[in-house]
Amino acid sequence: MPFEFVNQNDYILVKLSGECLGGEKPGVGDVMTQVLNDTKIKLFIFQASECSTITGAFLREMTLGYRALKAVNGQVRFVGGIPAVVHQIVSNGLDRIFICKMSLKGALIDFGLAKQKDFDVNVINPFLNATIKVLKIQCFLEAKPGKPTMKKPTDPLLLGDVSGIISVVSETFNGSFAISLSEAIFCGISKNMLGEDCPAITEKNVDLVGELANMILGQAKVELGQLGYAVQMAIPSCVWGKDHKIKHFGGGTCVVLPFETEIGTFYSEVMTSNAAINQIMKKAG
C-alpha cells in the first residue's frame, strides 16, 4: 500500500510513498475514516516526502476521509510534497482542504502542538558542522570551532575583512547566517579552491565569500531538515573593507562562532528572531 497510518498520540501521521494512484482496497479515505472512528483523534498530517506521484483519483479518496474529519471539526495538513505533487493538489482545487506546509513542525504549529517561538538549541550545531565540512572538503582547510559567544548590541561589526551573508527562512524561525574572513584566510581559501594565487581581495574575487556562505547553508540545510526545519535557500550577498558593517536580515539575537585554522581565526554568525537563544549560551558554557 502507498500509505501508512501512524498514531502519534496527539495526531495521526499518514506516510505516503511511491505512486499514490487511487483504487487501493481499502482506499485511503476509508482507512482515514476508520482510524478517526477508532482513535477519536481529529488531527491528520499527510507526509509526502517519499511520494513520487499522486493522482486526482487518490486525492478524491483523501477527500472522502476529510469529509468525515470535517464533521467532527477535525483538521488536516499536507507536508513534504515535491513540486509536482503539490501542483496536483492545487490544480484539483484542494489546497484549501489539504493545506500544504514546508515541514512537519510547521503543521504542528498550525495544530497548536508546537509553538512558533520555540527554539531548538541544536539549531546551531548544523551550522558548526557544515562550516567544518565545507572548509575541509571544498577549501582543504581544517577548522576547529571555539566557544560560541553572544554578540552585544554595542558591537555591530563583523570580525573580518570580507563577509558573506545569507538569509535563513523557515516556517518556524527566521534569521541569517554570515561568515567573515580576514584577507589572509580569504586569499588562502581562494588559492585552495581555485588553484591560483590570490594576493588580495578585489571586486573580481569578492563574490567567493558569498558562495562560501551559500555552500555552508546548503550543507546545514540537510541537518536542519533532519531536525524538522525546512529551510528555503536565498541569494547570498557580500561586503568587504576594513571595519565594514553589514545588516543581518530581520532582528533578534546573534551568536558568534569562532573557528581556528592554521592560517588564522575566522568567525561566523547565526542570527535568529528568538531571544530564547540564551539557552545556547548556557548549554555551551
Image: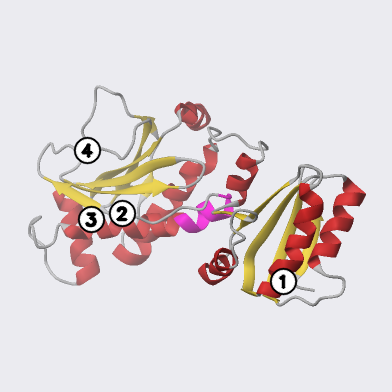
Give the spatial CA distance, label 4 vs label 3. Answer: 14 Å
Asked if labels 3 and 1 touch by Cβ distance under 8 angstroms, the answer is no
Which residue appears at 46% of the width and 56% of the height? 221
The residue carrying mark 4 is 159
- Image-based side of 244 in relation to 214, left or right: left
Question: Which quadrant: the N terminus?
Answer: bottom right
Disc nearer the start of the sequence (1/3): 1
Q: What element carries label 3?
A: helix
Disc nearer the start of the sequence (4/3): 4
Q: Which amino acid does label 4 sit on?
A: Leu
Which residue appears at 80% of the width and 56% of the height? 6
Nearer to us of marks 1 and 3 is 1
Q: Which of 207 and 117 is in front in this view?
A: 117
Instruction: Give, as a single range, the part of the protein colored magenta.
Output: 221-228
Disc nearer the start of the sequence (4/2): 4
Residue 58 numbered tag: 1
Residue 4 x %, y %:
79, 64
- Image-based side of 80 in relation to 275, left or right: right
The residue carrying mark 2 is 213
